[in-house]
């Protein structure tokens, strides 16, 4: 599912190759004649990559909410979601909806980040302060920056069985690119911030400014990859 249609030609070859990285843990679930939903698919790079593995596959893009999918009960074989649950205001409601549309015995495959286990070196006081501001913005938007560490319990509570998880570390951005991104988010937030956390955001933005200009380092994001059965 995504907001707005993305024609196949708009998806670059580089983006399409991300399927190998992002969905490799779920690849064994897909087979001929199966129906699957990629929730929060963005431009469709992973979706189309999965479809390319099956000659007669058909891919449709729809706009929908994760908590209100336009599918009948027990109508889908596999539900896949990468980098979605860390942004949801109502993850439990979304899991209930994914379970609703899955057929009995259908498979759930989720990949969710966990900033609490991200690896950053060096991790200075400025890095910590900037990231605290980043986490604050994530939570203000309704998300959970540490969702990866609790997703297994949430999936189990939603009624799924045979829940299996694996931790994977991936270099999604360079150390300096992450610093620049965090700084930009904080500066933008400060332009409209009128809440009591403005001082914390300002302090975090100063720390991010120092971090972005402190030199190179290493960054690897932690991802929880989860498989479960309806």
Image (cartoon, grey):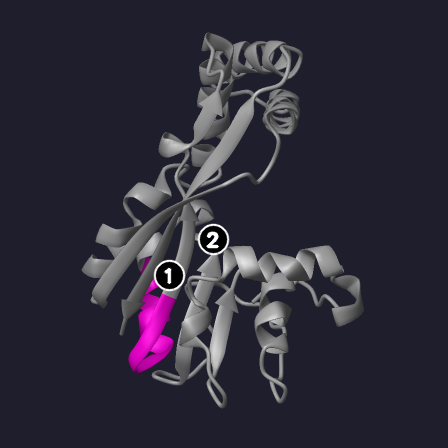
Find disc 1 in the rendering and name its residue. Answer: 94
Residue shown at 59% from the left, 77% from the top:
53
* Region rendered in magenta: 93-108
**Callout 1: SS:** helix
| Residue, far right | 9
Looking at the rendering, which quadrant does residue 60 occupy?
A: bottom right
CB under 8 Å between callouts 1 and 2? Answer: yes
* The disc label shown at residue 84, or none: 2
Task: Indicate yes or no whether the magenta region holds residue 107.
Answer: yes
- Say above or below: 63 vs 17: below
Please state if 212 lies on the left or on the right of 151 as rendered: right
Vertical order, 37 against 140 (above or below): below
Q: Secondary structure at mark 2?
A: loop
Q: State which quarter of the image contains the C terminus.
A: bottom left
Q: Earlier in the sequence, mark 1 or mark 2?
A: 2
Crowd band around label 1 with a 10 angstrom C-alpha radius: few (<14), some (14–19), many (20+): some
At x 35%, y 44%, the residue is: 148
Q: Quadrant of the N terminus?
A: bottom right
- The circle on residue 164 is none
Residue 26 percent across, percent down from the top left: 43, 66
Picture quadrant where residue 179 is located: top right
Which of discs 1 and 2 lies nearer the camera? The answer is: 2
């Amino acid at each position: 599912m995504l907001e707005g249609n993305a024609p196949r030609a708009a998806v670059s070859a580089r983006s399409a190759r991300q399927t190998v990285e992002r969905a490799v843990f779920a690849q064994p679930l897909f087979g001929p004649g199966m129906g699957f939903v990629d929730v929060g698919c963005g431009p469709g790079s992973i979706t189309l990559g999965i479809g390319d593995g099956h000659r007669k596959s058909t891919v449709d893009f729809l706009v929908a909410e994760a908590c209100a999918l336009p599918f009948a009960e027990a109508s889908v074989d596999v539900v896949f979601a990468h980098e979605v649950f860390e942004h949801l205001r109502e993850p439990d409601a979304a899991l209930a909806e994914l379970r609703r549309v899955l057929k009995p015995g259908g498979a759930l495959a989720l990949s969710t980040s966990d900033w609490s286990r991200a690896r950053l070196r060096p991790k200075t006081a400025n890095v910590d302060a900037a990231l605290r501001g980043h986490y604050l913005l994530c939570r203000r938007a309704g998300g959970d920056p540490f969702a990866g560490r609790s997703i297994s319990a949430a999936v189990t509570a939603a009624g799924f069985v045979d829940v299996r998880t694996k931790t994977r570390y991936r270099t999604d951005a360079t150390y300096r690119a992450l610093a620049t991104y965090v700084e930009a988010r904080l500066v933008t937030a400060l332009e409209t911030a009128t809440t009591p956390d403005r001082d914390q955001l300002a302090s975090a933005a100063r720390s991010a400014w120092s971090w972005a200009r402190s030199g190179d380092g290493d960054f690897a994001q932690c991802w929880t990859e989860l498989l479960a059965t309806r």
